[in-house]
Image (cartoon, rainbow, N blue to C red):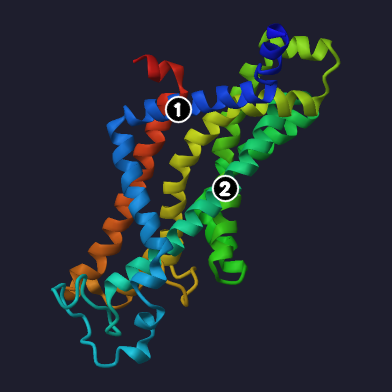
Amino acid sequence: MSTTASTSQAPTASQLAWRRRRASAAKTWADFRAQPGGMVGLIVLIVIILIAAFAPLLAPASMLDVTHVLNQPRFAQPSFAHLLGTDAQGRELWARMVWGARSSLIVGFAATAMSMIIGTVIGMAAGHFTGFVGGLLMRIVDFFLVLPSLILAIVLSSVLSRGLLTIVIAIGVTSWAGTARVVRAQTLTIESRGYIERARALGAGHWHIIGRHIFPAVMPLVLANTTLTVGSAIISESTLAFLGLGDPSSQSWGTILKNAMDVSAATSGYWWFILAPGLAILFVVLAFTLVGRAVETITNPTLRSR
């Protein structure tokens, strides 16, 4: 009876798998907390994401309507009444910055997601399939690597209708090649291991090998690369908006810089018009870089051993 009871209380395979995953997640979080730079970057990102998420509560949309700020002074310097100063229409710059955080982060995350998906799929395919298919995919990757991504993004933004979706497509389509090369190199390393040969010998097909063996192995590398790519995507979005290729009806940090250039803020003494969005872009990109470096240190055994 006791043997039967103990057998019935034994954990199932799925329960054991969940325990291993929770233990792995707890260990990863403990390793991440041991990285001071990564924790600082994570805290900064959480604060900025919360500001962007609660933008309608922090700064009602009416604050961005020029018809509601007719009595506001134009180009007012930062003070207790105007925390970050005002722009050429008398709108509070801090309100535009709050809404700009939402647009910049949406573009950064969406464009990075598109770039990572395209780069991961093509990278795994180029590393797994040999012969004509692998060679053709690598020639496509080399083409996008040689082609200046910013120029291609400008062309796409000029051809397509203006909007956040256009910027997301322009950045995502032009920034995946580097990820594809990294994933391909990792895939080739995995393909040379013994358990892949055993899987083939047991009759495993291409989709089984890619889905059950290659994809889980390259995911830590893709995750580390993702956190670093988000910062680059935000810079690209700000660049396109600064060049006037963004949506003029939406607020973003690049659009604010474009408005500052239009009124010659640098030579007219409106320093706050340039400083606020410039520092915001700097801090967000630095925060993503710190988080990315911490994740890379955790997932890379060579860096972790140091």
Can residue 254 be spotted in the picture?
Answer: no
Cα separation between marks 2 and 1: 25 Å
Q: Residue furthest front?
A: 1
Quarter of the image where the C terminus is located:
top left
- Whether residue 144 is visible here, answered yes or no, is yes
| Residue pictured at 39% horizontal, 85% vertical | 65
> Which secondary structure lies at badge 1?
helix
In this rendering, the answer to whether 133 lies above or below 306 is below
Residue type at numbered disc 1: Ala
Q: Mark 2 packing: few (<14 Cα in 10 Å), some, or many (20+)?
A: some
**Do labels 2 and 1 touch, CB within 8 Å?**
no
Residue at far right of view:
203
Q: Residue at x 72, y 31 (%)?
A: 125
Q: Which residue is mark 1?
A: 26
- Badge 1: residue crowd in 10 Å (few <14, some 14–19, many ≥20): few
* Residue 15 percent coordinates (x, y): 64, 25
* Relative horizontal placement of residue 9, taking residue 85 as reference (left or right): right
Query: What x and y, as percent, mark residue 170?
Result: 57, 57
Q: Nearer the viewer, residue 252 or 270?
A: 252
Residue where numbered disc 2 is placed: 113
Q: Is residue 104 above or below residue 144?
A: below
**Hey, what amino acid is under mark 2?**
Ala
Q: Earlier in the sequence, mark 2 or mark 1?
A: 1
Q: Is residue 115 left or right of residue 100?
A: right
Q: Could you tell me which residue is drawn at 30 percent across and 57 percent down?
A: 280
Instruction: Report the quarter where the N terminus lies.
Output: top right
Q: Position of residue 139 (x, y in %)?
A: 68, 35
- Horizontally, is 184 left or right of 237 in the view? right
Vertically, is 36 above or below 74? above
Q: Nearer the viewer, mark 2 or mark 1?
A: 1
Residue at image coords 40%, 65%: 54
* Residue 8 position by quadrant: top right
